[in-house]
Amino acid sequence: MAALQKIRSKGVLLVTIIAVALFLFVAGDLFRGIESLFQQSSQQIGEVNGKPVSIQDYQKMIDDLQTYYEIVQQKSSFSEDELNRIKDEAWQTYVQQQLIRQECEELGLAVSDEEVSDMVKSGFSPMLQVPIFMNQQTGRYDYATLNGFLTEYKKMKDAGTQIPDTYEKIYKYYLFAQRQIRDQLLTQKYQTLLSQSFLSNPVEAKLAFDSRADESDLLLAALPASSIKDEDVKVSDEDIQAKYKEDIEKYKQVIETRDIKIVDVQVVASEADKTAAATEMADATTKLNAAATNTAAGNVVRQMLSVLPYSDVYKTKNAFPNMISSTLDSMVVGSVKPAAFDPMTNTYYTYKLLGKTTMPDSVLFRQIGVIGKDEADVAKKADSIMTALSAGAKFKDIAKKYNQTGDSTWISTSQFENAQIDADNANFINTLYGMSVNESKKLTLENGATVILQVMKTANPVTKYNVASVVKELKFSDETYNKEYNKFSSFVAANTTLEQIEANAAKEGYTVRPINDVTASAHGIANIRATREALKWVFDEAKVGNISQLYECGSNDHLLLVALTGINKEGYRSVEKLKEDLTNEIKTEKKIEKLFETAKSVKSMAEAQKLKNVVVDTVKHVSFSAPTFIAATGASEPIISAAAAKTAKGVFSGAVKGNNGVYLFQVLNKTKTAEKFDAKTEQSSLAMSNFRNAYNSIINTLYLKANVQDRRYKFF
């Protein structure tokens, strides 16, 4: 009883302890859940229609699209700009697909597996018009080729054998193509459904045709708005407010942007760097002069680390930069071009013309790869093949005996002249291009491979050159970079506010440059490479007025300082932000009003030509369907097209207000084009045109409705 009484006396304390323990238990799960959600959120690069997009999913989109371009363009590497375009295309394609999928789901539109299969069999999709699915003989899409590959891939998969990387890449592309075809078909169905909502009629068709076919020739007198000085026109705050309210919908922005100011210092070679580079290149010229053989000249190129590697093969002028190709025909074989500097490419260069000849640009050939137990066996088989060919045996029959097709293929100079070619490939190319039509030859390469070559045709004889060139970019030294870095670093340390930076930049030789409306979807700042960290700072960390750290960026040749000067939220831009643009627009309008007051009483072209600052010209082929460009004012003026259409031949128009001036004209002539009116064709064209115009608006509306969030700048 005493123990029970003691417990009762501590009841409040026990309840509190239990409650705290329960809270900590529940809170632990809660915090773990929040942490998990935070981790998931931190891995998201965007959102469409409330659906998040993970880094992994986006990377797969990029990989798939990159594979597509690798296959279509037959290349394995891309520049930074090309990769950025692929990233943007992957994102834009995904967003549009999501917008249309959502609409189609609500409308009950779908694409069946059978429809996708039919498209794959027909090959109508651009996704299938790629070299790997082409018949080598016809150069066209061949379902049998694709199906053969799929069958072979499945056999290897089922057998558990190692699948070559090339096969995996092609199969991965095939799956990607199927997904794209499904989306393409869905988009077509959606567009077809919408297009049926846009019609035309005979009346509209006739009006549209006449607006295009009826043309006027004008004698036109223009009074440019620029003929009145800015200081002669006053703009009040009330004018600005009224103009802003009148055109407010023009000033709506759908994404948030930033205004910044930057100081960008590009490090360039010093005079000492230039002297050192010129000395090095003079040495290269001396060594090329001394090189007695092609191999020796090639060694000079390699030793000097030329950006243009040497291959001991003949190439066309297209393989060489302009500063080299432009002088090849004037050089004697064996001569050396002295070292020089090309400011267009920022390179020093020197080169030796080792040979010049005329040879085919393309060769049609076939080959048999000789395989044996050892070198002696390979040599014996190769000699046997050559003997059989000499005796009149058919090449394809021999190839078949060795389990090869013996099919012919064209090789053109453009396929290899811009590639880095090793000794074996150079030997192969030189042998092939040195053979006569119908000639067969045995070729044994340094890697041990032996092939029998036969040339069937040659085409397009061209002049080719064998050139050993040393081309080196003029670069700054570490000493130059460190000097520039220390100077700019001291400037940044001494000027910690934007006001100080703007006041003192010019004294140190720096320029402060404003950049407005920077978007998060940009791949950097001011088109400078490797500025993603600076972009992240602008959007994630900076407050208005903040100055960034000093960024080392570009190709390790830029120093960058950024100041955030403004944040432009989604919605209507403020009148303060637009004040300068509004002022200029209002000034133009007031100038036009002044000019109109001067011209409105003019009754003839004779009077019009006497007006002050008038510019008289003849304008021909003016039609209602297109705005007329007026050279005197540098503007497209739809009002001239409209006024000319309703003014009879010989009649004077009177004063007409345009976008950039006041105009007076007389119609000199009225004509019709030779085009014939076809009501059905015109109606169909109008309906399609109306649909195309509306479709863009529909997609834009869906985009806004989907609340698309693009946070790729955080990761890519």
Image: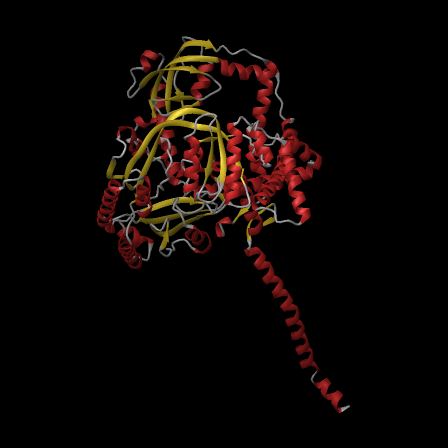
x, y percent for residue 461: 40, 24
Q: Quadrant of residue 152?
A: top right
Does 713 sit above or below residue 228?
A: below
Q: Residue at x 30, y 18 (%)?
A: 611
Q: Is residue 190 among what the camera can see?
A: no
User: Residue, x 64% and y 66% (percent of image)?
Assistant: 29
For the N terminus, give its image quadrant: bottom right
Quick one: which residue is furthest to the right in this view?
1
Q: Quadrant of residue 167?
A: top right
Please indicate whether residue 431 sits to the left or right of residue 511 in the image.
Answer: right
Q: Position of residue 146 (x, y in %)?
A: 63, 35
Residue 317 spot, x, y in % from top left = 35, 31
Q: Nearer the viewer, residue 423 or 694?
A: 423
Residue 443 in sight? yes
Measured along the vertical axis of the image, is residue 42 above or below residue 164? Answer: below
For the point 54% across and 56% down, the residue is 42
- Vertically, is 45 above or below 696? below
Q: Is residue 504 above or below residue 610?
A: below
Residue 400 percent coordinates (x, y): 60, 33
Q: Nearer the viewer, residue 83 or 208?
A: 83
